[in-house]
Structures are given as structure tokens and as C-alpha cells.
Amino acid sequence: MSLEFVYFDIQALGLMPRLVLEANKIDYVDSRVDLIKWFTGESTPKKSETPLGQVPLLRVNGKEFCQSTAIVNYCAKLAKIDQIEPLEALKVDMFVETAKEVFDKMRLASYPALQTVKAEEDPTWQKRGAAFFEIFKKNADEKFALMEKCLSVLGVENEFVAGKETLGDYYCVFWLMCAVDCGLDGELEKAAPTVVRIAKNVMSKNQAVEKFANNKETKFWPWSLTN
Ligand SMILES: N[C@@H](CCC(=O)N[C@@H](CS)C(=O)NCC(=O)O)C(=O)O
């Protein structure tokens, strides 16, 4: 089977698919689309050539699929990490939804600020990045606290399922990587210490996860590339 993951040269919505594949040593081609060329219509692939006009997309034996959650879930199936008891899956899913909800609330509230600056006036993303982060970082600790509350309600302290990696553990790595990249790691540690503990736990047990999490070559957001 051939597997090609196509996304911009950032982590963001590409982080989870790449992490699941790499943590479980699944062979894939990690194709990076040039973000600037995407918007000028010169990228490979072009926006108009993708199934839904967006990335990420996954090519499985050449056939293209979109939507990051669908891609993450498919990768989890390939990695066989979804083979857990229904009640364990319920716990994992409740946290995954919470982690995604926090991320979506923070990023979707921040994009309008970024769009107030014209791309031509800000080729290095400095102004757009600053506008984005001003909103993204606002009251981040309150949003992080929801993830901590979720873990506390579920009674999860170090891992979701004893001796098994799950999407819940990987989402903690996602949040640690995002927070470090945005300079929010102190806030995450304070408001959601269990998220950080679970992330470090899976990193200490799986070298591929540790390598992935410590790889600073791929930034989380495009606007931190030049910072
Ligand atoms: N619901 C989609 C959202 C995908 C999405 O928003 N992709 C953005 C990049 S993170 C994109 O393709 N932006 C460029 C565009 O829309 O032209 C998913 O989860 O995959």
C-alpha cells in the first residue's frame, strides 16, 4: 500500500496524522505544499486540484481523501491503536473532542485578526503573526483548564489505557508541541499539568514520539517561521 500525506510545511492540522504515522513506524511520504505558491495558484497540487480545495489530504494508493479527523482516524486504524475496549474508547474520544474543541476555539477566534493585515504588506508574516498570537494567547489558561477538568473527570493521570498508546495520549503531545511553539508552555503546565505529564510519559516510552516532539524543523504556524 502506498501512503502520501500532503500538507503545508507546518504542523497545525498536519501534526496528528504525522505523529500517529511516525509513532507507529508506518511508511509514508510526507509531501509539503508551498504555502505562498498555494495562494498564487502555482503549488503542487493546486488548490483547485484537491478534492475539497483544502489540505491536509491523504493519498492512499493514489486516491485522495480530505478532512483531518478522518485522516487521523484512518491512520489510527492502520496503526491498530483504535483496538481498545468501548469504554476505553469513550474516554479517549471525550478527551480528543475536548482537546480539538479548545484548539478550534482558539484558532478560529484568532484568524480574523490575522486577516486584517494584507499579505503584500507583510511578506515575513511578522504583523499577521503578532495579530494572531494576541488573540490566540488571550486567556489561554482558562481554555487549557477545560482539558485538565476533562482528564480529572475521567480519572486519567498518566495514560488513557495502561500499556497502550491512544489518540488521547497523542493529543497531549499535540498540545505540548503547540504550546511550546507559541510560548504558552508555562500556561499549559500551570493550567493543565496532566496534559503535560501524559505527553512526557508517552515521549519517554516511545522514542519515535520523543524524536517527533523534539524536532524543531517544522514550526507549528507559518507565522512563527520567521520569528
Ligand atoms: N475541516 C478541514 C479544515 C482544513 C483546513 O482548514 N485547511 C486549511 C489549512 S489548515 C487550508 O487548506 N487552507 C487553505 C485554503 O483554504 O485555501 C480539516 O480538518 O481538514
Image (spheres, grey):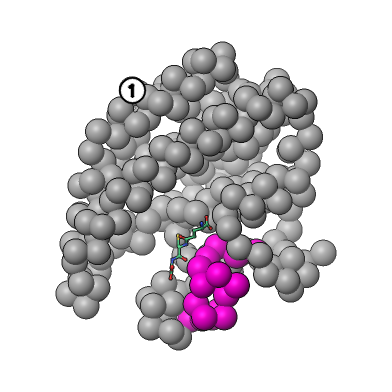
- On-image quarter of the C terminus: bottom left
Judge from the rendering whether residue 101 lies leftward or rightward of residue 56; answer left or right: left
> Which region of the structure is painted magenta?
43-58
**Residue at the image position 82 percent from the left and 64 percent from the top:** 1
Picture quadrant where residue 106 is located: top left
Judge from the rendering whether residue 201 lies leftward or rightward of residue 214; answer left or right: right
Q: Nearer the viewer, residue 225 or 91?
A: 91
Q: Secondary structure at mark 1?
A: helix
Callout 1 environment at 10 Å: few (<14), some (14 to 19), or many (20+)?
Answer: few
Q: What x and y, as percent, mark residue 104?
A: 41, 45
- Would residue 157 be seen by someone viewing this image from the given angle? no
Q: What x and y, as percent, mark residue 189?
A: 37, 26
- Mark 1 is on which residue type? Lys
Residue marked by disc 1: 190
**Residue at the image position 30 percent from the left and 29 percent from the top:** 141
Judge from the rendering whether residue 79 lies leftward or rightward of residue 36; answer left or right: right
Q: Is residue 187 above or below residue 13?
A: above
Q: Nearer the viewer, residue 91 or 4?
A: 91
Look at the image and say whether residue 53 sits in the magenta stretch. yes
Q: What x and y, as percent, mark residue 206?
A: 65, 36
Look at the image and say whether residue 75 sits in the magenta stretch. no
**Residue at the image position 20 percent from the left and 72 percent from the top:** 118
